[in-house]
Structures are given as structure tokens and as C-alpha cells.
Image (tube, coloured by chain):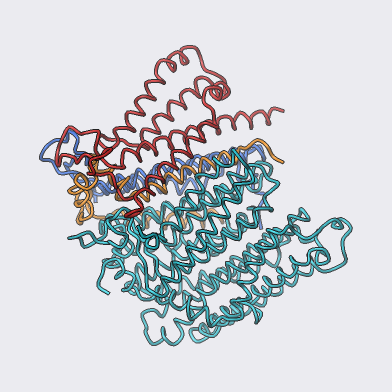
Amino acid sequence: MKQMSRIVRTVTNLIYGFIIIFGFYVILHGHLTPGGGFQGGAIVASAFALLLISYGALNTEKLLKKDLLSILESGGLTMFIGTAFLGLGITFFYNFLANSGSWFGDAAVIGINPGNMNTGGVIPLMNIAVGLEVLSALGVIVLVMASGAEFTKKKENS
Amino acid sequence: MKKIIFGIAFIIFFSFLIVSAINMRQFGEPIFSEMDDYFIENAQSETGANNVVTSIVFDYRGFDTLGEATVLFAAAVGIIALFRRVTK
Amino acid sequence: MIGNFPYIAAIIFIGLGIYTLMFKKNLIKIAIGVVLIQNGVNLFLITLGYIKGAVAPIYTYAPSGQIMVLPTPQALTLTSIVIGIATTALILSIAMMIYKHYGTLDTDQVRRLRG
Amino acid sequence: MNLSNHIPILIIAIPLLAAFLVPLIGRINKKATGILTTLALSVSLILTIILAVKILTVGPQVYVFGAQSPALTLPSGLKFPIRIMFQIDAMGIFMGLITAVVSFSGAVYSLTFMEQHSGLDKYYSLLLLLTVGMFSMEFTGDIFNFFVFLEVASIAAVALISFRGVDLGEPAEAGFKYMVVSSISALMVLFAVGIFYGQYDLLNFAAIASVVKYSQLDKIALGLLVPVLAMKAGAVPMHMWTPDAYSEAPAPISMILVAASQASLYALFRVTFSLYNITLNTLAVGWIIIIFGLLSMFIGVTMAIIQKDIKRLMAYHAISQTGYMFLGVGVGLAVLANPVALSQYGITAMEGGIFHIMNHAMYKGLLFLTAGALFFRTGTKDLNKMGGLAHSMKYTTIFFIIGAAAIAGLPPFNGFASKLLIYESVYRFNPLLSIIAMVVSILTLASFVKVFHSAFLGPKLPQFREVKEVPKSMVWAMAILSCIIIFFGLFPDLIVKNLVHPAVMALIEQFKYTGTVLGGI
């Protein structure tokens, strides 16, 4: 994959940061507004895909390290299953933070309300964990497939 | 010959599915909704999250979500393994 | 009958996917067939949750006095969409690998394993 | 916090956590990945045995995720469960034991078998994920959760089958076939989930079983579930993926794949017995399953005789042996609505079929491992190129003889025990079926005599002069399975009475299955 024209690269430079910020916004507000870890992670990964098609696989690999993303992926999943393990005093996946008064532990106003960030118990934590996992997993998949395509093409020419 | 067998199998399967769609309950008018009513009424007080879908995804059906994240992880690991460079 | 049209639309998706799988010979087209079936099944699931005139099941600034659609199918569809992404990515990678080794995507020429 | 209540989830969560950590640890130390995997799987094997003892003495266990207490299936004022739960009865734990033993010995075997390959951290991670997927498929009481873990198992299996696809084309090809087959079957399962959900607004197996009416839609759901699960189990009209996947995967993975297809077989029995039970037309559905079995037995063995590739030959035998399970359990299903026939021979036939599941996992696993050992030392899978290996690979030869005798149903081994149960009970149902089963058994014996002759007997070939016995970890893995085979062969009554009979009764007695969740036993 070669890099695309200057117009595309300039527009990418302008917007990819905003896409990533929007993705993290969706991840963090998953328990209040439409969205959540998967959707936000997919949005961030779409920014990676944008970088990839406008700059080409080889240039993007300098910016996004595959190793870093793999570590982030395992870390996100470990955090997710770790949060589930913490509920093991009662049951696996027990929401031990909800309505407890500590982190994310405020009781929600029942019925229609403007939303309070500090609610949801373990749900925001799991959203963050899954968000990290999805963005890194999709990023790794896109990067590896793109560089693999380059790899297969070279083999074909030689 | 193979195409004829495939064609017959396809037609049988497709009519099977169409029959299921026609017999399905009316679109937009669920008959039973006990489980979902419970979620809509109690999700806010039990989990504290405003978004009922998220509270189902991460609380009531959290194990599904773990499985789904695992599928994505498995696919990523599998793709890295498939495109690994060094072969001894 | 006409009230069930959304289900039939989903079924047509699935049928197209099965047709592609059965009669097409290109590995990428087979992958597309699998994706079509996925989309059809996801569409079928999500239509099950709809209630006429209802709003999304989210309490943040929801319109007052409205009933809400069933939330479970949305959660199930979310799960199955992510699984679909993973399946598609793996299937395409394997197709790339086959192309690397055989230099073709035609199933008739790829088949080394038979009998 | 009392950990003994949490055993069902720990069996799954420990390998899952290990699977997430293995890629991280693989960056620091490559050797540690295999050891960590073996450790995690041995913990889950021990926990499975503890849970099995508990279930067989106390009764079925439920584990509700995220509830106030692990056994709280119905929160106050509800008629049906709302959370995901594990529901493990004697049948579920029977399959769980198979999975635990097979995956543990697979991991031990892999320690040296896979040593020369690169990307081992990914390999072990995927192996753990495959195990987790199988365990969850067998333990879960939620139909959507079943779909999710079916996908976990199939994606991990595909990645493992095409693990050698970097160098070779054939593994990638086999992986592609398996991927397409398993995604179609998973999606059809999902469609059936949608049908059940749309009708009853329920996702729990037991809750659906208590309300299922066998309406037109339920018939369609059954018509979708039975063929796709039979396809995943490798029954004959849909068997095209089986020989490719089994023969192209690394040997320990072929062994685990056998157990993975049996998890689908278990799901098929679960659907027909626990979900529908006598609401369906048992005679018709039973005969459909019997016909699957007959076709699998006969076509599997005839295709096996003409093979030259040793793993492909064994893969066709795996199809053929799956037919016995279909036959035994199918006869049980056909007479399910008839209490007299059920108690006379139906239960015995089912005992034979269910016992054969475990026996088959053990001896087919052992045979795949010996084939892997031959491949490890000689570098070929072609029977015509092998010969005289009995001189240099003594242990492997002994293990192969044990496995071959067991699969052919010779008396002191476990295959004989389960096959005898099937023959004598099926004979009372329909003599012709029993005769076909015996003929297939004889053909199996003939085929394995041929393999033994061409691979092990004869003079020592010059190109294999350097060949020596395989490393210790591979011998140990094969020894574990051989010991189980011999033990089962010597004391079949003990196993049938304590392990197989409760499993069969758990399938037949639907009210117990629903009662565990909904109360009212």
C-alpha cells in the first residue's frame, strides 16, 4: 500500500486526533449514552485504519507499534477478567461497586435524568477495559493484515 | 449434477426460512416480554447505569461479553500467528 | 404477511449468503457470503426487539411517557456483530494466506486436499 | 468467601486468565508459556474431578453469574431466570472430564512436539482458548452463551488448524473449510436462538424446555439445530471438513478437535433430550439420528481403508466411530416415548453411545498422538514411506497397539465394552443395525492391521536408521491416555454404573433438568 495524495494526508492529520478523542468519549460515557467499550474501541480503530490507508502500512508501523498494541490487548482483557474476579466474594461478574458509595458507586436517579458520570459500579471500568482491548485488537488485526498484504505482494513479484 | 443437488438443497432451506419468517409473531408487537420488562424496570436501581443495553451487556449478561472479547482476542492472536515472519 | 416484511428482508439476506456459498468459486466471494448471512441473522435478531412507537432503552434525557424497545436483542446483536468482525478478519487472513501459497483464489485450483 | 461454591467458574476462568497472560509472558520467557499452560490446565483438571465427585454425590450444580449468591436462579417474584448461568449435571460433567483430560494431555504432549515451531506463545494461548470454549459449551445453561462459546472454540480451532499455514498451503486450506463450516453452523444456531427468543422471550435452556410447545417454529428451530450440530460433529453427509482439519492440524490439536466435535455432539443430545424431550416426534427424529450414524459408520470406514496418509486415515475412522455414538443415542431417542422399550434396551443403548464418546476421545486421541510421534521422528505422514519403526520406537509401538485394539473393539480394552453395549441393545431394536455395526468394527480392525503392518513391521529401513524414541513429555502424554484406556477396559462396570448411567439419566429425565433451575423437584 503506497501513501495517498497530499490532500488526503492533510485531512487525515486534521481529523484523526478528533476521531480518537470521540472514541474515548464514547467509551467513557458508555453507561450513560448510546455506545460503550466495543463501539468506542471500534471508532478509535477506525482512526488507525484511516492512518493506514492514507500513509501506507510501512509508515504507519513506525507510529503504531504492533508490540505495544498486543500488550495493551492482553492488558485490557486481564483488567476485564480481573474486575470480574473481584466480584468473586459473591459471584463471578457480581457488580460489587454499584450503589456502594465509592468509585462509580452513586445510586442513579430512577427514571429520566441528565445522567451522572459517577454511577454504574463496575460497568465503566469494564467499558474502559473492553475499549482498550477492542481498539488494540482491531488495530493489530488491521495492521497485521495490511503488512501481510505487502508481504504477499512482494513474494508474488519476485 | 452437483449443481442440481445444491439447488434443491438451497430451495428447501430457503423455503424453510421463509416459512419461519411468515409464522413469526407480528413485527413490533412482542407477546411475552417478562425478561425485558424486568431489565427496563430494575436495571437502573440494580446497576446504577442509565443505559439499559450497557447494563445488560456488562452486568446481566457479562459472561457473554467476556466470551465476545475472547473471540476478538482469539482472532487477533490467530491472525498474528498466521502472519508470523520467522519460521524455523 | 406484509407486517412481517422485516423478517422476510432478513431471510432474503441469509438466502443470498447461502446462495453465494453454494454456487460461487472465489474465496473472497465465499467470505462475502458468510458476511451476508451474518448481517441477515443480526437483522433478524434486532427486528425481534422492536415495539411500535417505542424509544431507545436509555434513561439519559429520554422523551417522557414513552415505552422502551426490548433491550436484550440489542445486547445480543452487539455481541454477534463483534463476533462477526472477528470471523471475517480471520477468514480473510486465511484467504490471503492461501493466495500467497497457491497464487489463486479459485476453489477448483486450490483443492489439494481431497479423497 | 467459600471457594468450593465457585469451582464451576474457576474451571473456566483460570485457563482463560492464563490465555490472556501467555502472550505477555511469552515476551519475557518463551519456555515459560508451555509450563504455564500445562499448570493452568492441570488446575482445571483437578477442579473438574472435584466437581465431578460433588455432582455425582450431591446432584446437579448451578452457578449464576453476577447474582446475589451462586445458586440464586430466580430473583424474587420472577418465573424465569434472567441471568446467564452454568448448569452442570452428570452429562455435562461427563463431557467436562473428557475435555479436561484431553486438553491436559495435549498440552503435555505439545511441550516437546511443538518445540521447533515459532510463535509458541500464540499457540498455547489458542490452545487454552479452545479448551475454555469447549468447557463453556458443555457447562452453559444459556442458549446464547452456547453460541458465543461455540464461536470461541471454532475460531481458536481454526487458528490452530492453520497454524502451520505460514509454510504450507494445505493447513490454510483446511482452516478455511473449517472456518466456513463453523461460521455457518454458529449462525444457524444464532438464528434458532432468535426464533426461541421471539416466541418465548427466554434464553435459558431449562426455561425454554419448560414452555416449548413443538409449534411450527419450534420444528424449524429443531430442523436448523440438528443438521448444523451434526455437521460440527462430523456426521457423514456434511463431513467434508473433518478429514482435512484433523489431518492438517498439529497432532495434539487433532486430538483436542475430536473432543471439540464431541462438544457439538453433546449439544445435539442436549437439544433433542433436554430441550424437546418427548414433545417431539421421537421415533422420526431418532431415526434421522440413526441414519446419520449408519451413514457415518459405513462411509467413514470405507473411505478410511483406501487412505495412504496416516492422519487422514485416522480422521475417517473418527467419522466412523462418531456413527456409533449417533447409533446408540439415536436408538435411545427413538424409544424415548415408550417406557417399556426404554427400560428394556433404550437405556443400555444410550449407555453404550455415551460411554463410546469417552472411549473414543481417549483412544482416538492416543492414535493421533502416535501418528504425531511417527511424524515427529520420520517427518512423513505417508504410510507407504514408513516401515520397520517397531525396532526403534518401542513405546510408540506399544501405545499404537493399545489404541488400535481399543478402536477395533478387541476384548480387554475399552472400545469393546461400549461396542458390546451398543450391539446387544441395538440388536433388540433392529437386528440389521447391529449387524452393520459389527461389520464396520471388523473393517476397522482390518484397516488398523494394515497400518500396523506398513508402519511398524518389516525390516529396519535405511533412511530411518537415525530414528529413536520420542522425548519424555510425549511418552507421558500417551501413557496417561493408555492407562485410562486399560483401566476402562478392565473395569467397565464400575465406570458405566458410576459415571455413564447418571449421565444417561440426566439426559432422559427432563424434569430434573428444568427443575434444577426453575425449582419444584
In the picture, which chain is red?
A
Q: Position of residue A47 (x, y in %)?
A: 43, 25
Residue found at x 54% / y 70%: D358
D43 vs D122: above or below? below
Q: Is residue C6 visible?
A: no
In the rendering, what colour is chain C? blue
Q: Quadrant of the C terminus of chain D?
A: bottom left
Q: Quadrant of residue D279?
A: bottom left
C86 vs D71: above or below? above
In the rendering, what colour is chain B? orange
Q: Position of residue A157 (x, y in %)?
A: 69, 27
In the rendering, what colour is chain D? cyan
- Judge left or right: residue C18 versus residue C114: left
D196 vs A45: above or below? below
- Judge left or right: residue D98 versus residue D314: left
Residue found at x 28% / y 68%: D210
